[in-house]
Image (cartoon, rainbow, N blue to C red):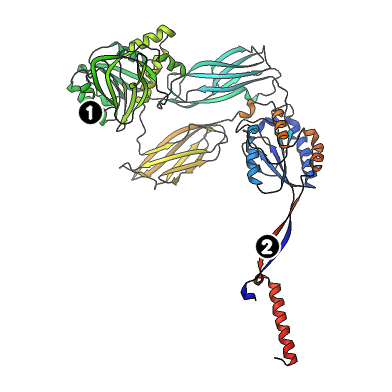
Amino acid sequence: MLFLGPFIRYFSKKINEPIIAIVQDNSASIVQTSDSTFYKTDFQEQRNQFVQALKEDFEIAQFLFSDEMQKTDAAADFTGEITDLSSIAEDINIRYLDQNLAAVICFTDGIYNQGLNPIYQQGVSVPFYAVAMGDTLVKKDLLVNRILNNQIAFQGNDFPVEVEIKTIKSKGEKYKAQIFKGSKKVWEQELEVTSDYGVRTLKTNLKAENSGLNRYTVVLSRLDDEVNYQNNSMDFYIEVIDAKQRILILADAPHPDIRVLREALLKNETYQVEFRLLDDLKLDVSDFDLVVLSFLFNEVQPKLEKIKETLRAKKISSLYILGDQTNLTLWNQEDVGFEVIARSANSNQSQAVFNPSFPLFKLSDEQIATIEKYPPLASMFGNYIFLGQNFVLFNQKIGSVKTESPLISFTEIQNQKVGIIAGEGLWKWRMNNYFVHENHQIFDDLILKTVQYLAVKSDKSYFRISHNNEFKANEKIRFEAQLYNESYEIINDAEVSMVLRDEQGNESSFTFSPFQDSYQLNISALPVGTYTYQSSVEIGGKTYTKKGQFSVKKIQLESAETTANHDLLYQLAKKSGGELVYPNELNKLVELIKARDDLAATTYLEEELEEIINMKWLFFVLIGLLGLEWFIRKYGGAY
């Protein structure tokens, strides 16, 4: 019988005890109120007693959350720098799928600064009870809401900074807004609050003095009776580049467009601009970062051919300026962006129309609107045919017709950057800018952005390090490295090391890990500050080094909003069939939960099948019975 493999089927009764998930908000906003002492002391003991009372009838699972959920019985320290309320439902629904989850109890102030609005997401499938922490009373507050600034500036130039200040219940108060670079004050303005609730934007220009990554701090003076001072300051960083770039403007005759181009470039102290007539040129063009070829394609010029050969061989960026007199036969031999098939000997009067998909640099809405109203440029009349990839900044608008013909465009040919202005009359643009705005700022910015893109050289070195210039205080620091041999083939069989140094001079050493064809290095979150590094690798008897720096920025989301949002918690609780209570009503909450009949243990029968041959006790019973039968037969003389 055993060899036939029979099964025995039986049922067992299973009991699932009800589970209550207790979720504690661990973010800093909880203790940035007048009740902070209570939440750090007495509240902890009251909460522990509450948990013990529930353990008499329920299985308890405890969590802390700020930016994510963490299952732990540890007490909250209220140091979380981000609050994501939407993470609660997402985590609970996945974690307790098909389990007897009875309820979720959340201790929070209802403030969130990351993730979805929990009202508009799928909530938990069980009653949600909210213990409303924090303070709903709106208090006097003065805070730095955000800072807008360029990421990069050239040494010696001014760079713009916009500081957005938010004021709450402080009408009539006077305060100072200051900007510090280290301990040095670089800007200050005295202000007065004009309304109880408002946002004010301050604009200024600062001088980019020291090369490298520079940290600045915006500080607002404290108001009397202001509860939260942590949001009165904010840091921002800017990388200052020390790089004088040489620009050569070449022409066969003076022209007003060349003059306005030169005047715009001379506003940037990092540019060394030289103008030369082609016939008088005695300079080596290979010493320049950018060569502007203006109106040089009207006739054959042998000297120009040698210059272009040097530019292509040395991968030196070029900016071509064309006009209605450009010889199209000569131009179409250039193979630098587009050809023009002539339709007549006439010229077009072309206004600029912005291409919103242009990716190489940004212009503001005000700049775009102003440039599109500039007078038309005289451009070549014909069909424009693109050669390869071409990035168009402005297309031509002829009369009221918007065309696909480029007016200002860029391309890259065998690692040589090329820009093309296909119109004559830039001097009219600059004059119009002054007539409308009484300055040349927008026109000059357009020229400076164009030249900056062309003049910045791509990294073609054998050893490269890439990383963000700025990290958040809770963010991992990630580096990527690429290594090439002399045939410019990517390799990763050498050891890449790095020495990291903080502002106090403390050093830490790291080694990159090979990853696919390159290298990676991940460093745990670092304290706020500016860090420098030196990375090195040895290959083929040569040592390559790279130096750089980055900043770790303090997260200030939790101090931006400290007024509790109990209305949000009430809506979440009612939506799920739960209740909202306050910290002094925890005993009431225990009674509410224990009084619910639907928060109970569940039982079910579980069917199980087991082969008889696996039941050892049955095996020995059968052996015993067989032995007894043999003994009886033997004893009776029948065997």
Q: Which residue is the site of mark 2?
A: 608
**In the image shown, does 236 or 588 lie closer to the viewer?**
588
From what the image shows, is residue 238 above or below residue 497?
Answer: above
Which of the marked residues, 1 or 2, is nearer the chain's N terminus? 1
Give, as a three-letter code, the residue at label 1.
Answer: Glu
Q: Which residue is the site of mark 1?
A: 309
**In the image shown, does 91 or 16 lie closer to the viewer?**
16
Spot occupied by residue 303 in the image (x, y as percentages of width and height): 19, 22
**In the image shown, does 296 or 222 lie closer to the viewer?**
296
Residue sitting at 73 percent across and 39 percent down? 127
Give the position of the N terminus as an image quadrant: bottom right
Q: Secondary structure at mark 1?
A: helix
Spot occupied by residue 362 in the image (x, y as percentages of width and height): 43, 23
Spot occupied by residue 520 in the image (x, y as percentages of width and height): 46, 42
Spot occupied by residue 460 in the image (x, y as percentages of width and height): 34, 35
Give, as a three-letter code, the residue at label 2.
Answer: Glu
